[in-house]
Structure formats: C-alpha cells, structure tokens
Image (cartoon, rainbow, N blue to C red):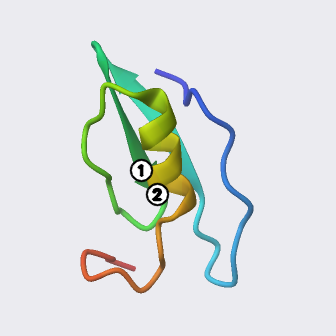
Amino acid sequence: MPPNHPPAPAGPESHRTTTTERGSFCYAHCTCGWRGPSRRSRDKARTDASTHPPTAPDHHP
C-alpha cells in the first residue's frame, strides 16, 4: 500500500517518515525502523511523523 503522506524532509541522518493506513487506522513510520502508534486520526499520525526525533529511545539505526 503506498504512503498516504509525502515523506518528511531528510535530516542529517536521512530519516524519511511516511504515514500508512491499515483498515480504519493510520500510523507513521520511518526509514530507521521507528513506527508510531496506530491512530484513528490521520492528522495525529502525521504529527507523530513530523515530530519523530532521531534520538528517540525506540530509535533503531
């Protein structure tokens, strides 16, 4: 399934986030392997993607 949101600009570590829908839920994910929580609100999933810090505790390079 193609992403529903354009990738975020690449940062210094080339993190690229997108959002994907699965049923009635939407979630953000990153090329580093990070995945945000499932949301019913697409806007909240986009916010998760835009605020994904590359130094998050669940960050896996």
Q: Secondary structure at mark 1?
A: strand
Q: What's the distance in space between the residues labelled 2 and 1, CA to CA? A: 4 Å
**Extreme top residue here?**
23
Q: Secondary structure at mark 2?
A: strand
Residue 23: image location, x then y, percent: 27, 13
Classify 10 Å Cα crowding around label 2: few (below 14), some (14-19), many (20 and above).
many
Residue 6: image location, x then y, percent: 69, 39
Q: Residue at x 64, y 73 (%)?
A: 14
Left or right: where 9 falls relative to 15: right
Q: Quadrant of residue 57?
A: bottom left
Classify 10 Å Cα crowding around label 1: few (below 14), some (14-19), many (20 and above).
many
Residue type (three-letter) at the residue carrying disc 1: His
Q: Quadrant of residue 12?
A: bottom right
Q: Contact (CB < 8 A) between labels 2 and 1? A: yes
Residue 32: image location, x then y, percent: 43, 68
Quadrant where the image shows the C terminus: bottom left
Q: Residue at x 31, y 25 (%)?
A: 40
Which residue is denoted by mark 2 in the rendering?
30
Which residue is denoted by mark 1 in the rendering?
29
